[in-house]
Amino acid sequence: MSREDFRFELGDGVAVLTLDRPDQDNAFSAAMGRALSAAYRRCDEDDEIRVAVLTGAGRAFCVGADLGAGAETFARQDDASFSAAAVSPPAFAIRKPVIAAVNGHAIGLGLTLALQCDIRLFARDAKYGVVQVRRGVMPDAYAHFTLPRIAGFAAAADLLLTGRKFQGEEAVALGLASRALPAEAVLPAALEIARDLATWTAPLSVAVTKRLLWESGRLEPEDVERKETALHHHLMGQADAAEGVLAYLERREPRWRLRVSRDWPDWPD
């Protein structure tokens, strides 16, 4: 699967989604948004895909909106067709883990797209910032949902209201990234995590865990307990619950049988 401004590669259960405008530091284009949306839908639906890794070609991850139109960059849009989401579905809504291999600068929409992902690795010396308030617009791509959940209200207010830039080590300190690495090490490290997930974790177990994790911020403790219990009842007694234990005891790779597309539970209210 190859599209304008975007590359999709699949191997051993890992889909690598590459923002591919390296000469423009992967400035976000309409074609890129359409292709990334389609790739996310495929990742959600295709049981052969266990994990997705989102990265950028060249020296940047994504420097945000393409400013080539100058003063018209943020011209008024048609009410019916415009969405600040940028992609649909967002990464947090698909039922597979999405790892952001932020290999270089991630500015504006570039960073807010990375914040949608479940695990984020950042290049240590690159520049990051949700800079939209310095461009006369406002943060997008669900940043008002993702950033407070990831880093807390105080850090979210600092970054969203000031639009200031920072580097990888501060991203780790703020909780935005799991690790800050040399730029050339980011994608290999993300792929190592992805391959481990694709081999050793049960697909349906991961999928329901991811959904409940992102949902949990809107729930009371008793709601979480009720949903965890209902989902345990769906998983216990099934093939993967037996296989996970046997594979561990026999010191071998598990052979998972449940499929996200076929065995997804009725989601508890």
Image: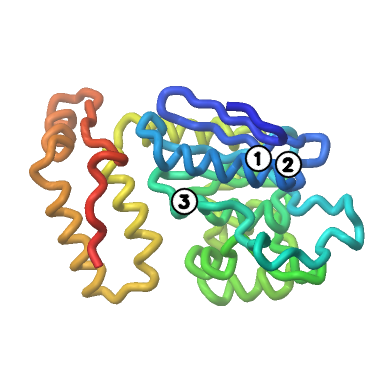
Inspect the image, locate mark 2, and give the three-letter code of the amino acid beneath it. Ala
Inspect the image, locate mark 3, and give the three-letter code of the amino acid beneath it. Asp
Distance in Å between CA atoms under marks 1 and 2 = 6 Å
- Horizontal side of 217 relative to 203 (left or right) equals right
Mark before the other along the chain sequence, 2 or 3: 2
Rendered position, 60 above or below 110? above
Rendered position, 233 above or below 202? below
Rendered position, 50 above or below 266? above
Judging by the rendered image, the residue that carries numbered circle 3 is 118
Coloration mode: rainbow
Classify residue 50 by image quadrant: top left
Mark before the other along the chain sequence, 1 or 2: 2
Judging by the rendered image, the residue that carries numbered circle 1 is 103
Relative to the observer, which residue lies in front, 260 or 152? Answer: 260
Instruction: Locate the C terminus by quadrant.
Output: bottom left
* Picture disc at residue 60: 2
Callout 1 secondary element = loop
Callout 2 secondary element = strand
What residue is rendered at 59% in x and 65% in y? 143
